[in-house]
Image (spheres, rainbow, N blue to C red):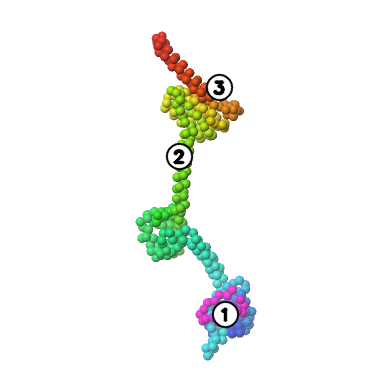
């Protein structure tokens, strides 16, 4: 063996057809942990145990000149060998020379890359997603993903083309990409392209990487339409609820100067506040002298609601009208008494009929008194 071979920066291990070691250079001594004296003349299977044993080394004997083979040592390391056949003066093969370097770390990295590629492939092939990679000028380096199918774009179709020459007419998308290429962190954006909606993310790369920007897009056309449909339904429900509230609390002018508000259904603070606003506006608009709150249609009220109703009566008085309550049942009466609410200055009648009779009588008496005062000259003075 030419001793110049020992100067190469690789481990050199040579063995004959009987798998006996014929060369073991200093680099092999450093990397493989055995001296040349310990290795020469011994079986390569013994001095360099690998997974697969003798069959692995015989496979190297049968390999083509210049081929590259990896072997896994039993200690967990991996070596990559370049094979050169050793021949005698007549050209017959008498052994093999293996030039090797440890590639354990590279194997781990390659395995991790394969795992990541498998994950990315599964992501791209099964989800309505597309991934694009741009260089710093906006040229496509990669375009892939199942999300391209519905819009008729093939994977890699635009690779080598500049994104701004293709999508320059879509200013929103172009600006989004410019910000990403400039390294400006950009939150998720919803963009409209090809008549579809996409949620897009742009991930800037470090300055020393050729791939300047990674773009991820997920089609959300159907989900956006469902959101719009849901919002429309919610708006319709809100309108219907407003109509129902108005129908369930009609303000009726039952006599000249007298309005009645039949309250039906459950009462809460929000509905009571709406009732107060509507009733006060009706009293002012109709210039009513009396406002009757008929609670016959209410089964129960809580303490807060009872307090709101009493404040409503007092607010009516500030408009110059008299508030009257009718239809209080036993449960509501118990709530009022238990909470110590004061009804002494509020007119209460058992039924709406009695309240109307009270209002009509009081209205008639008031008119008669006004007429007498107008007819009495002394009173006029």
Q: Secondary structure at mark 3?
A: loop
Q: Nearer the viewer, mark 2 or mark 1?
A: 2
Q: Secondary structure at mark 1?
A: helix
Picture quarter containing residue 328?
Answer: top right
Q: Which residue is mark 2?
A: 239
**Cα distance in 3D space between marks 3 and 2:** 39 Å
Residue at the image position 45 percent from the left and 47 percent from the top: 229
Name the residue at 53% across, 28% down: 295
Which stretch is magenta?
A: 52-72
Q: Quadrant of the C terminus?
A: top left
**Mark pair 2, 1: CA separation:** 82 Å
Quickly name the residue at label 1: 59
Q: Which is more N-terminal, label 1 or label 3?
A: 1
SS label for mark 2 = helix
Mark 3–mark 1 distance (CA, rounded to whole Å) = 110 Å
- Closer to us: 162 or 242: 242
Q: Mark 3 = which residue?
A: 344
């Amino acid at each position: 063996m030419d001793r110049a071979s020992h100067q190469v920066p690789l481990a050199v291990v040579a063995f004959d057809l009987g798998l006996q070691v014929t060369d073991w250079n200093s680099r092999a001594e450093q990397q493989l942990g055995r001296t040349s004296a310990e290795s020469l003349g011994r079986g390569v299977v013994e001095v360099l145990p690998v997974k697969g044993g003798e069959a692995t080394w015989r496979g190297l004997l049968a390999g083509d000149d210049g081929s590259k083979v990896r072997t896994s040592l039993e200690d967990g390391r991996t070596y990559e060998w370049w094979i050169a056949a050793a021949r005698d003066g007549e050209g017959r093969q008498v052994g093999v020379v293996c030039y090797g370097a440890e590639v354990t770390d590279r194997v781990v990295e390659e395995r991790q890359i394969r795992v990541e590629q498998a994950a990315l492939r599964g992501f791209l092939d099964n989800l309505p997603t597309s991934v694009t990679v741009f260089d710093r000028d906006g040229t496509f380096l990669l375009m892939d993903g199942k999300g391209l199918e519905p819009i008729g774009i093939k994977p890699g179709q635009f690779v080598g083309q500049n994104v701004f020459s293709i999508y320059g007419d879509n200013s929103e998308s172009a600006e989004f990409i410019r910000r990403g290429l400039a390294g400006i962190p950009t939150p998720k954006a919803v963009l409209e392209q090809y008549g579809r909606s996409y949620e897009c993310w742009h991930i800037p790369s470090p300055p020393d990487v050729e791939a300047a920007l990674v773009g991820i897009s997920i089609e959300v056309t159907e989900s956006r339409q469902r959101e719009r449909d849901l919002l429309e339904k919610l708006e319709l429900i809100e309108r219907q609820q407003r109509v129902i509230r108005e129908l369930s609390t009609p303000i009726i002018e039952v006599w000249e100067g007298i309005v009645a508000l039949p309250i039906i259904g459950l009462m809460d603070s929000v509905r009571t506040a709406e009732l107060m606003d509507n009733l006060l506006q009706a009293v002012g608009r109709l210039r009513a002298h009396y406002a009757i709150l008929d609670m016959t249609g209410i089964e129960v009220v809580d303490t807060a609601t009872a307090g709101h109703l009493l404040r409503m009566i007092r607010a009516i008085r500030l408009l110059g009208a008299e508030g009257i309550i009718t239809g209080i049942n036993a449960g509501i009466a118990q709530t009022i008494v238990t909470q110590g609410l004061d009804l002494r200055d509020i007119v209460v009648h058992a039924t709406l009929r009695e309240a109307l009779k009270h209002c009509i009588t009081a209205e008639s008496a008031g008119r008669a008194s006004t007429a007498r005062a107008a007819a009495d000259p002394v009173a006029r003075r």
